[in-house]
Amino acid sequence: MTYAGPEDTARATRTGGVPLVPPGFEWPACGECGLPMRFIAQLRLDELAEQGPKGSAEGSGTLAVWMCQNDPGMCDEWDPDSGGNTARLFPAEAALTAAEPPQGETLVAASSGIAYQQVEADNYDEARGSWAESRGVSPRQVLGAWGGEPSWLQGEEVPECPACDRRMSFAAQLEEGHDHEAELGFGGGGCGYAFFCAPCGEAAFLWQC
Ligand SMILES: [Zn+2]
Ligand SMILES: [Zn+2]
């Protein structure tokens, strides 16, 4: 996934902007501080099997992620279980532009549309480095990757589905962002990891740095 210019409201996979949601949606509040969380990404899971390497999970609909940024570092927002972030699976038809809550840090300063690149490499880090080098651009232009295996910055941390207790399927890895305004807040140089359980309709998010 590479940076493809701002993309505030499209149905596409992107970071930032305003989420597209189903009817009856309520903006998620942080389980720690109670304030509305910041929308950071929506991932079109139908693109996972198309754009991810062989063996990537298959999904449908959209995986949307919120993370508390009201007092960064204070709500355990890296943790999949703290309540400081949340990930939801929405049906593909979810197309209502969510109403932004009147208070709290709710939107990323700049959105990022995603372009896809296929790179021959042994792993994500190698692909990220070689793509940037071949274009003569900063590796920060690479915004993450679909599927395959997570490239963990710390120890392996695949969440278990809260409904069926099985290991969740890996959807995507997300970088901080291509510049300061687009940064998602993973502790400076961290990566986010999004997971889902298709049969249960559950999703989870965590980050490491
Ligand atoms: Zn909070
Ligand atoms: Zn499950």
Image (cartoon, grey):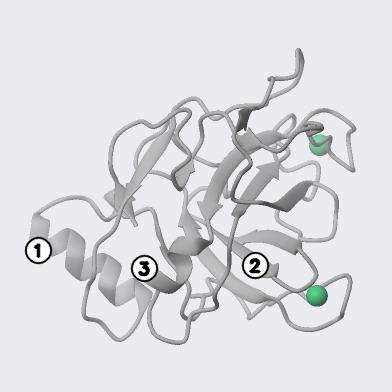
Q: Earlier in the sequence, mark 1 or mark 2?
A: 1
Residue occupying the point 75% across, 74% down:
199
Q: Quadrant of residue 95?
A: top right
Mark drawn on residue 134: 1
User: Does 40 appear above or below 59?
Assistant: above
Q: Which of 190 and 206 lies nearest the eye of the viewer?
A: 206
For label 3, the residue is 51
Disc on res. 109: none
Q: Is residue 77 visible?
A: no
Closest to the camera, between mark 1 and mark 2, is: 2
Q: Which mark is residue 195?
A: 2
Asked if the residue at label 3 sits under 8 Å from ligand 2, the reply is no
Residue 28: tell me if it is visible.
yes
Which kind of residue does numbered mark 2 sit on? Phe
Foreground residue, 135 or 146?
146
Left or right of 113, for residue 129: left
**Image location (x, y in percent) of residue 163:** 89, 72
27 lies above or below 168: above
Q: Quadrant of residue 101?
A: top right
- Element assignment for label 3: helix
Disc 2 crowd rating (10 Å Cα; few below 14, some 14-19, many 20+) is many
169 to the left or right of 144: right
Position of residue 151 in the picture relative to residue 39 (left or right) = left
Q: Helix or strand or loop: what does disc 1 sit on?
A: helix
User: Quick check: which quadrant has ligand 1?
Assistant: top right
